[in-house]
């Protein structure tokens, strides 16, 4: 299982009976074998309550479930694709960026305010994540989309990483993030450097950064 | 990467980088799609396909009146560079073969190939021996049939005898499916229709045909004191038009440089 990268914009997944995949609707490029694509009403996993949760949170991206036996190729909008393999930890990512993920992963929605209260909510606004973000937890692989190539930057306790909020894609691991501001009088008079806000990530884990400040 | 090219060091009929292809003309002719030439060295003449002097050429190798207005003939000697929307560009050689390609993806071809309209709308078929240049969003992936392909992701195919449509809406059958089809609840998967390829041959795939919306680069910002600032397509332009009361501060966002 897992995703095999064919090139920077296309991944291949093997589907076997009994193990399903979720993918963004319309993201299938081609397939071999006997595979069916069913639009998932619930927009993912976890029953009706999680569906309602996702709808309320605005994290209900149109997903479909992929089942059967064969090989499926995924790609979307010419975006670059990063495959992230999770081994028990939690990935925080915007729902729009999810290209495909394995059904073995637990999908959830997280309130930004639960990490740092009001500042967490402000952070969500600045990064364009909104008040909620999607979490994926467990063992399995995720294919995440980004505009431009993706950099994988490790975070270690001694070395926090500062990321431009617009270039932030996802992170996983035991990471605390906070919004650091570098605002001075220049910003107040409209002569700022344009880098007034940064996302500071500390702890142990990995953050994925795209080589573009374009939102998806 | 940072090599400065001149007419001598430019490759002949080869890629300069992943996004640019260089064609060498020595009194010969190439067909190319309008607007795909980005630069050239030497004496090259570009004429529309309908140009009188090229009538014979058109008779022998251009059999696609529907697309005639999109194509020009380059003739002369020199080197010309081809590129398209930052797509990956590659050349392919046909040896007494046939290949069908999405019309928008074909950039240029040698007149030794014959261009014909495919039966499938929006596709062109090249027959014969020669070189052609095609663009794709991301590198082209070659696949063996049997395979089903999303129409958006299809670049073309070679030697496949039977491209056909495949419709798949199994999830719209049964009681739940009927409910779904009637109410529209649950949406569609967007994967109900594919092109199916069977038999011997090769299918060419790309990541997507879709493009990011174009953003103006290098536009003069609309700010006080900037001459000629007519407002680019930046996010600030929308706010700038709003009337502001005297003494009021500008938008917080703009002040923070967001």
Image: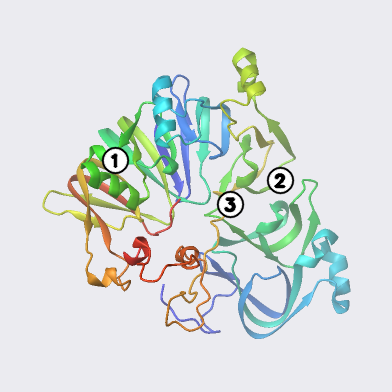
- On the question of residue B9 being in view, the answer is yes
Q: Mark 1 lies on which chain?
A: A
Residue wearing tag 3: B210
| Residue A105 percent across, percent down from the top left | 35, 28
Residue drawn at (63%, 18%) of the image: B179
| Residue B151 percent across, percent down from the top left | 65, 43
Q: Are marks 1 and 3 on the same chain?
A: no
In terms of secondary structure, where does tag 1 sit?
Answer: helix
Depth-wise, is mark 1 or mark 3 nearer the camera?
A: 1
CA separation in Å, label 2 and label 3: 26 Å
| Residue B205 percent across, percent down from the top left | 59, 47
Q: Which of B101 and B168 is in front in this view?
A: B168
Residue drawn at (57%, 64%) of the image: B85
In terms of secondary structure, where does tag 2 sit?
Answer: loop
Asked if labels 3 and 1 touch by Cβ distance under 8 angstroms, the answer is no
Relative side of A57 to B227, left or right: left
Relative side of A192 to A41, left or right: left
| Residue B228 percent across, percent down from the top left | 51, 82
Residue drawn at (22%, 47%) of the image: A177
Residue A112: mark in rendering:
1
Quarter of the picture containing the N terminus of chain B is: bottom left
Residue, far front: B246
Q: Residues within 10 Å of mark 3 (few under 14, many from 20)?
A: few
Q: Do labels 2 and 3 share a chain?
A: yes
Looking at marks 2 and 3 on the same chain, the residue that comes earlier in the sequence is marked by: 2
Residue B159: mark in rendering:
2
Image-quadrant location for residue A104: top left
Image-quadrant location for residue A18: top left
Q: Which of B73 and A130 is in front in this view?
A: A130
Q: Mark 2 lies on which chain?
A: B
């Amino acid at each position: 299982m897992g995703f095999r990268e064919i090139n920077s914009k296309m991944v291949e997944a093997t589907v076997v009976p009994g193990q399903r995949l979720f993918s963004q609707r319309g993201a299938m490029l081609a397939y071999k074998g006997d595979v069916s694509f069913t639009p998932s009403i619930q927009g993912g996993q976890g029953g009706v309550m999680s569906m309602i949760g996702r709808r309320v949170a605005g994290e209900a991206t149109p997903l479909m479930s992929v089942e059967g036996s064969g090989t499926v190729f995924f790609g979307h909008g010419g975006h670059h694709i990063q495959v992230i393999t999770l081994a028990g930890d939690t990935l925080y990512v915007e729902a729009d960026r999810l290209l495909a993920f394995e059904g073995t992963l637990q999908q959830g929605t997280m309130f930004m305010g639960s990490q740092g209260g009001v500042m967490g909510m402000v952070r969500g606004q600045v990064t364009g994540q909104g008040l909620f973000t999607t979490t994926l937890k467990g063992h399995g692989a995720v294919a995440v989309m980004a505009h431009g190539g993706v950099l994988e930057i490790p975070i270690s306790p001694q070395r926090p990483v500062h990321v431009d909020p617009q270039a932030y894609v996802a992170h996983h691991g035991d990471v605390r993030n906070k919004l650091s501001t570098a605002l001075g009088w220049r910003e107040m008079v409209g002569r700022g450097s344009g880098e007034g806000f940064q996302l500071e990530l500390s702890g142990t884990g990995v953050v994925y950064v795209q080589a573009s400040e374009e939102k998806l | 990467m940072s090599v400065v090219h001149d007419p001598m060091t430019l490759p002949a009929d080869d890629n300069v980088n992943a996004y640019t292809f260089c064609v060498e003309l020595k009194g010969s002719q190439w067909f190319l799609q309008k607007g795909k030439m980005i630069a050239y060295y030497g004496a090259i003449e570009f004429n529309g396909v309908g140009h009188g002097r090229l009538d014979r050429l058109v008779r022998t190798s251009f059999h696609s009146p529907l697309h005639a207005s999109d194509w020009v003939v380059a003739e002369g000697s020199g080197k010309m560079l081809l590129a398209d929307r930052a797509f990956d560009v590659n050349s392919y050689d046909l040896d007494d073969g046939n290949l069908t390609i999405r019309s928008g993806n074909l950039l240029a071809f040698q007149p030794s190939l014959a261009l014909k309209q495919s039966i499938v709308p929006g596709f062109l078929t090249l027959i014969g021996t020669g070189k052609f240049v095609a663009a794709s969003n991301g590198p082209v992936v070659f696949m063996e049939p049997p395979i089903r392909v999303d129409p958006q992701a299809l670049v073309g195919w070679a030697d496949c005898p039977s491209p056909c449509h495949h419709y798949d809406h199994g999830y719209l059958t049964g009681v739940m499916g009927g409910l779904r089809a009637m109410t529209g609840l649950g949406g569609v998967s967007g994967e109900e229709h594919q092109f199916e390829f069977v038999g011997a041959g090769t299918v060419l795939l790309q990541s997507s045909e879709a493009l990011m919306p174009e953003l103006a680069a290098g536009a003069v910002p609309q700010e006080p004191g900037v001459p000629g600032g007519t407002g680019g397509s930046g996010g600030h332009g929308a706010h700038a038009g709003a009337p502001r009361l005297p003494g009021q501060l500008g938008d917080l966002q703009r002040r923070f440089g967001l």
